[in-house]
């Protein structure tokens, strides 16, 4: 196998080699970025099935990779972004929460502001619409068995007497 030699090489061949390496790396990065999930349309978000968080937790295979609407308690902290529900029978694992790139454009300004200004360690009563995933490990140090990628926040308020949606 020939070895690449920079020392003593003409400047033009070094520039060509560097440019080729940059192109190769860039093509790998772009290819990796294009393998993500498909952006949900506003119609898909509007037609999301409403389910209880407890049902999602008890039957994750039923809702995996589905667009759903769920009411839960959202909590964020340092390296923590989760939803839970106290009404579910214990012990259930918590679900990691992430937000897609377009959630803000689908969410009312007042609700968007409430979520963005959520205090660390304080639970918030929310209604999220998004894609539930149960086929991997998610979140900080991959310690969550489930993920919920939020496409829209329909409601957000301080948690009080939490009652799941009917």
Image (cartoon, rainbow, N blue to C red):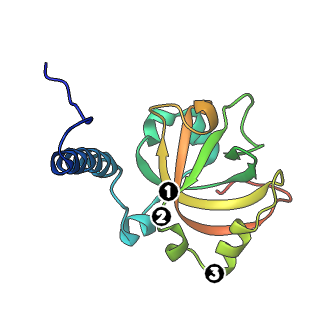
Image spot of residue 88 (x, y percent): 72, 38
Q: Residue at x 45, y 42 (%)?
A: 63
Q: Residue at x 31, y 45 (%)?
A: 32
Q: Residues within 10 Å of mark 3 (few under 14, many from 20)?
A: few
Mark positioned earlier in the residue sequence (1 or 3): 3
Mark positioned earlier in the residue sequence (2 or 1): 2
Q: Residues within 10 Å of mark 2 (few under 14, many from 20)?
A: few
Q: Which mark is residue 130?
A: 1
Q: Residues within 10 Å of mark 1 (few under 14, many from 20)?
A: many
**In this image, 94 relative to 42: left or right?**
right
Q: Is residue 15 above or below residue 136?
A: below
| Element assignment for label 3 | helix
Q: Which residue does the numbered mark 3 point to in the structure image?
A: 109
Count all numbered tags in the image, as a single digit: 3
Q: CA distance from mark 1 to mark 3?
A: 18 Å
Q: Is residue 58 above or below residue 111?
A: above
Image spot of residue 31 (x, y percent): 26, 48
Image spot of residue 80 (x, y percent): 70, 44
Q: Which mark is residue 101?
A: 2
Q: Is residue 110 above or below residue 67?
A: below
Image spot of residue 141 (x, y percent): 61, 32
Q: Are marks 2 and 1 in contact (CB under 8 Å)?
A: no
| Element assignment for label 1 | strand
Which quarter shows the N terminus?
top left
């Amino acid at each position: 196998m020939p070895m690449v030699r920079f020392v003593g090489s003409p400047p033009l061949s070094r520039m060509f080699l560097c440019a080729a390496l940059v192109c190769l790396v860039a093509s790998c990065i772009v290819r990796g970025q294009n393998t993500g999930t498909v952006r949900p349309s506003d119609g898909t978000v509007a037609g999301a099935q409403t389910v209880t968080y407890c049902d999602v937790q008890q039957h994750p295979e039923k809702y995996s990779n589905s667009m759903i609407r769920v009411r839960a308690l959202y909590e964020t902290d340092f390296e923590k972004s989760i939803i839970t529900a106290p009404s579910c029978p214990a012990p259930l694992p918590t679900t990691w929460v992430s937000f897609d790139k377009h959630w803000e454009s689908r969410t009312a300004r007042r609700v968007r502001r409430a979520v963005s200004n959520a205090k660390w360690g304080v639970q918030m009563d929310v209604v999220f619409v998004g894609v539930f995933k149960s086929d991997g490990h998610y979140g900080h140090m991959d310690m969550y068995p489930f993920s919920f990628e939020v496409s829209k926040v329909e409601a957000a308020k301080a948690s009080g007497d939490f009652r799941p949606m009917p």
